[in-house]
Image: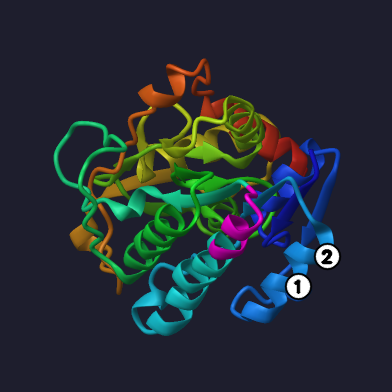
Amino acid sequence: MKVLLVGAGGQLAQHLIPNFPHLVALTRHQLDLTDRAQVTGALRHHRPDCVINAAAYTAVDLAEEQRDQAFATNADAPAALAQECQKSSTPLVHFSTDYVFPGGGSRPWKETDACSPINQYGASKWAGEEHVRRECEQHLILRVSWLFGAFGQNFVKTILRLAGEREQLRVVSDQQGCPTWCGHLSPVVQGLLESRRWGTYHYCDAPASNWWEFARTVVDQAVELGWPLKAREVIPISTADFPTKALRPTFSVLDCTRLAELGIFQSDWCEGLERTLRELGRP
């Protein structure tokens, strides 16, 4: 299967690239997804058997001020991709987020639950999903959460940097979700493509956690591996103690039952964290 991967410079794409042997990977500098002519030209030139869209505007707080930029990348670009894929009957894999949900309650969110984003980032991703569903019959929308890995910017790398600078960290403990190692997503995508069961799915690693527990685990594992961190204490705080421009869901754990019914199961994010720390190497 020849795969065209767009958004190849991001952390998610960097983990996907090694696992698809017949792959053309294009960064945003090589393919401007907001330019419809370029999108059309890329699909006609490469003639892929499948397109994977790993491009996204992910600056959650900045999206509150840069709404147009967020929607251009997260909504308009997927619409163009979906329309071109439909013309050539090419399956499209599109990544979305747990932030499409409002984030209340205590029950993991199912694919069939109503979406009602509480920030502009989530709204832009929801709009992108709707375009893909409407425009491309053979689509796979994969909602994921709290991604991390050795590439790009993410929570794990931020915590490691801060823990190397400070003796004490203060991290929000009243927002629950599921950390997910990007390296676990390749077999999920491959399994879905093989199934040809088009639609919307949820994937996240297990178990559920919160940002404070996640941060504490990052620090503990790094210390065990010999990282020279200054941090001696990770203190839990409330969301009210750490205001941000964009609202965050308080509970965005994803229900992955639909994938499990296809024989695709959740992995342990702690294992992914250890692999990430080893990939990054001790400073």
Q: What residue is rendered at 17% in x and 34% in y? A: 106
Q: Is residue 236 left or right of residue 32?
A: left
Q: What residue is rendered at 20% in x and 47% in y? A: 114
The local crowd at label 2, few if under 14, some if 14 to 19, many if 20 or more residues have their Cα within 10 Å, is: few
Q: Which residue is mark 1?
A: 41
Question: Does 18 appear above or below 160?
Answer: above
Q: Are marks 2 and 1 in contact (CB under 8 Å)?
A: yes
| Magenta stretch, main secondary structure class | helix
Q: Is residue 114 magenta?
A: no
Q: Position of residue 205 (x, y in %)?
A: 48, 30
Q: What residue is rendered at 68% in x and 41% in y? A: 227
Q: From mark 2 to mark 1, how far is it between C-alphas?
A: 6 Å
Q: Which quadrant: the N terminus?
A: top right
Which colour assignment does the render follow? Answer: rainbow
Q: Position of residue 11 (x, y in %)?
A: 65, 54
Q: Is residue 237 left or right of residue 257?
A: left
Q: Nearer the viewer, residue 50 or 144?
A: 50
Residue 18 quadrant: top right
Under mark 2, the amino acid is His
Q: Is residue 215 left or right of residue 15?
A: left
Q: Nearer the viewer, residue 58 or 77?
A: 77
Q: Is residue 282 visible?
A: no
Give the residues in magenta.
83-90
Under mark 1, the amino acid is Gly
Question: Does 141 appear above or below 10?
Answer: above
Q: Which residue is mark 2?
A: 45
**SS state under label 2:** helix
**SS state under label 1:** helix
